[in-house]
Amino acid sequence: MPGIYFHIPFCKQACHYCNFHFSTSLRNKEAMLPAMLRELDLRKDYLKEKELDSIYFGGGTPSLLTAAELMLFFDAIGKYFTLRPGAEITLEANPDDLTAENIRALRDTPVNRLSIGIQSFREEDLRFFNRAHNAAQARACLEKALSAGFSNLTIDLIYGAPTTSDKHWAENLDIFFSYGIPHLSSYALTVEARTALAHFINTGKAPAIDEEKTARQYEYLLASMKAHHYIHYEISNFALPGHFAVHNSSYWRGEAYLGIGPSAHSFNGESRQWNVANNAHYIRLLANPTGLPNLSGLPEVFEIEYLSPATRYNEYAMTGLRTIWGVELSRLRQMGAEYESYFLSHIRPFLETGLAEQEGGIIRLTDAGSLMADGIASAVFIVGKDDLSRNP
């Protein structure tokens, strides 16, 4: 079933590593919410199915919204869609926003899952990342959320930072395990273009990323999560049984979703589109309260890409190799026998070296292969062709 993603493009301050679309100025917040609700109204027919499996508030920092502001979204959703019983409704939150009062207010909304951007439980790491919270708040918010009845939690942790030794990384994971949280998203610190981190490294103000340490800490992560019975179901995601992220899993499994807000992406199985990444421009385009009956007359709001057969193959190969579900040969065969043959011929070297494994009609990466996931995916991509059947 489909899901809806709302991109809330505001943050208190810019993390040094982040390249997502956001603004540290809240001056457009009051106008942004009506614009997003307007977009939802215009695009209510984008999803063929009207029963939702998930709703996800991401950003940016959605925890900057009040409970009353969140309810505006839920009221609008209720006009056009129904929620599957037990649907996952996630709010990304920063620890400094999760005061006892705010958590109590969230309990009175339909939100039933919090994704908390801890990143580290260590003060030195948090200062290096330029996070808005401190180490004490990182722990306190978890205790408050659990006490308030939010048992369905996930947190983010970053490894491979210059400030994070192997010992410190082990301590971060030990703290995570001590809370019994059912889900973890853990990412290697990466240097994205046009971020403060990239500038610091390029100017010698921060050391370059130590790739060997990053790989070592990733391997420790895999071993630790397995020892605590977490399932490694996607390269960066781990969950106890029954706690896979419904919304993000739909992305990885190629299901339809609708993205609302500046820079938000949408996918309907045939095309992918993404909204303009400019808050003021987005608000201006959607300001007319009467407007047109749909967004087809407003091409300035989004760009669209109709997916060629080769692009669909590439996307499936990439996401499949990143997940526990792997690449199903039968699904490749549905695309055309030539796609199955192409994949098998290009994945063979990785099967022979133990970086990938085959179980029946499914091929997935091993733990060793997951260290090289991007490179292996690139090796099986179709490059320079739109359709294998027409361009052998």
Image (cartoon, grey):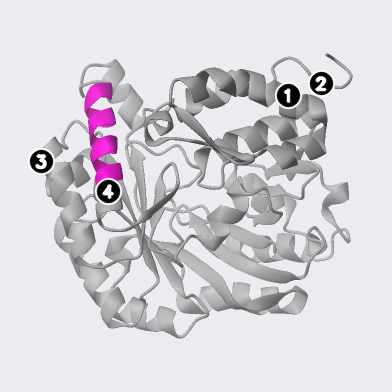
- Label 4's element? loop
Horizontal relation, residue 181 to residue 347: left or right: left
Residue 12 drawn at (x, y percent): 36, 54
Horizontal relation, residue 222 to residue 171: left or right: right
Sequence-wise first label, 1 or 3: 3
Name the residue that disc number 3 marks: 167
- Label 2's element? loop
Label 4 is placed on what type of residue? Arg
Name the residue that disc number 1 marks: 341
* Residue interval drawn in magenta: 210-223
Name the residue that disc number 2 marks: 388
How packed is label 3: few (under 14 Cα within 10 Å), some, or many (20 or more)? few
Label 1 is placed on what type of residue? Ser
How packed is label 1: few (under 14 Cα within 10 Å), some, or many (20 or more)? few
Residue 171 drawn at (x, y percent): 13, 50
- Give the overall secondary structure of the magenta segment: helix
Q: Is residue 324 magenta?
A: no
Sequence-wise first label, 1 or 4: 4
Residue 310 drawn at (x, y percent): 76, 27
- Label 1's element? helix
Residue 344 drawn at (x, y percent): 65, 24
Q: Which label lies toward us, 2 or 3?
A: 2
Quadrant location of the N terminus in the rendered image? bottom right
Q: Which label lies toward us, 2 or 1?
A: 1
